Amino acid sequence: MRISDRVVRFVLKPVVFLASLSPAAWLVWAGLTGNLSANPLSDLTNETGVWTLRFLCATLAITPLRRLTGWNPLIKFRRMAGLFAFFYGTLHFLTYVIADRFAGLDFPNGIVAWTTVRNLAKSVGEDIYKRPYITVGFTAWTTMVPLTATSTAGMIRRLGGKQWNQLHRLVYATGCLGVLHYWWLVKADIRRPLTYGAVVAALLAFRLIKRTGVGIRGAVSRLAWRRTTVE
Ligand code: HEM
């Protein structure tokens, strides 16, 4: 199948962009029209968390899918998927800050005051320190910051391809930490975190097999070449 660059750029990319934005649009609509549950802030935290993980899986899936299908334009969607993972991750973090931390504060000098900012930062910091699944979630989000900051063509040029690739392997840690965070926070039914864990493990295993496969193939061909030159 041959799809021109123009179709990818002007049709497929805008469609994928709008589709990626639709969960956020749905959440805003559901929030404003009262279509969330009795605990809307918890719904928002959970939904944005799951969408972060889905976009992380999509980002990690692009390289294996490209190799398996041979459809190279897929790579043009990787940056978008990664940026959407960061977008939903940041929404998730912000809903946690508001729903979980801000809601529990006292406001001795009114809401709009420096003490509010200070108390909020203290409360978030203490919670990240105290609750292990929050520590892991926050670490996962932090790993996405340098990935997002270096996602532009200018940054790729400035860092150089090799260094950029090395830095962007951090996304493997993001995926693992995201799954660990989810696993840690569920109380009883671990089927969903287990499923995401299996997906992330399969996507990382693909890379490992690819690398060791190439390594083994390279070693075999070097050995064969040595033999023929010695003989
Ligand atoms: C890559 C980053 C992250 C990913 C992939 C992620 C993923 C998730 C997922 C999948 C859920 C569960 C949704 C459900 O039960 O349906 C969740 C819940 C939650 N996450 Fe995250 N998260 C991330 C970062 C963070 C950060 C930075 C924080 C806060 C510092 C955080 C705090 C929470 C909280 C409070 C919940 C709700 C727990 C509950 O059910 O009470 N997460 N997250």
Image: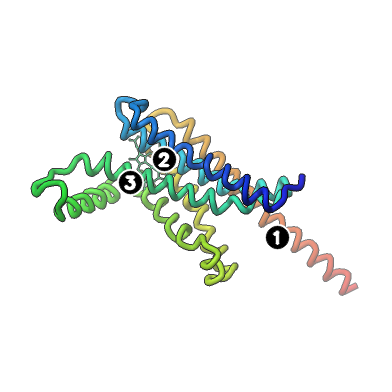
Spatial CA span between label 1 and label 2: 37 Å
**Quadrant location of the N terminus?**
top right
Closer to the chain start, of discs 1 and 3, is 3
Q: Where does residue 79 sit, x and y in percent of width and height?
A: 55, 54
Spatial CA span between label 2 and label 3: 11 Å
Which is in the foreground here, disc 2 or disc 3? 3
> Does 39 sit left or right of 147 as displayed?
left
Q: Name the residue rendered at 38%, 45% in the picture.
A: 91
**Above or below, 222 relative to 90:** below
* Rendered image quadrant of residue 27: top left
Q: Which residue is mark 1?
A: 215
State ligand 1's quadrant: top left
Label number found at residue 94: 3
Of 32 and 225, nearer the camera is 32
Disc 2: residue Cβ within 8 A of ligand 1's nearest atom: yes
Q: Which residue is mark 2?
A: 49
> Does 131 sit left or right of 56 as displayed?
left
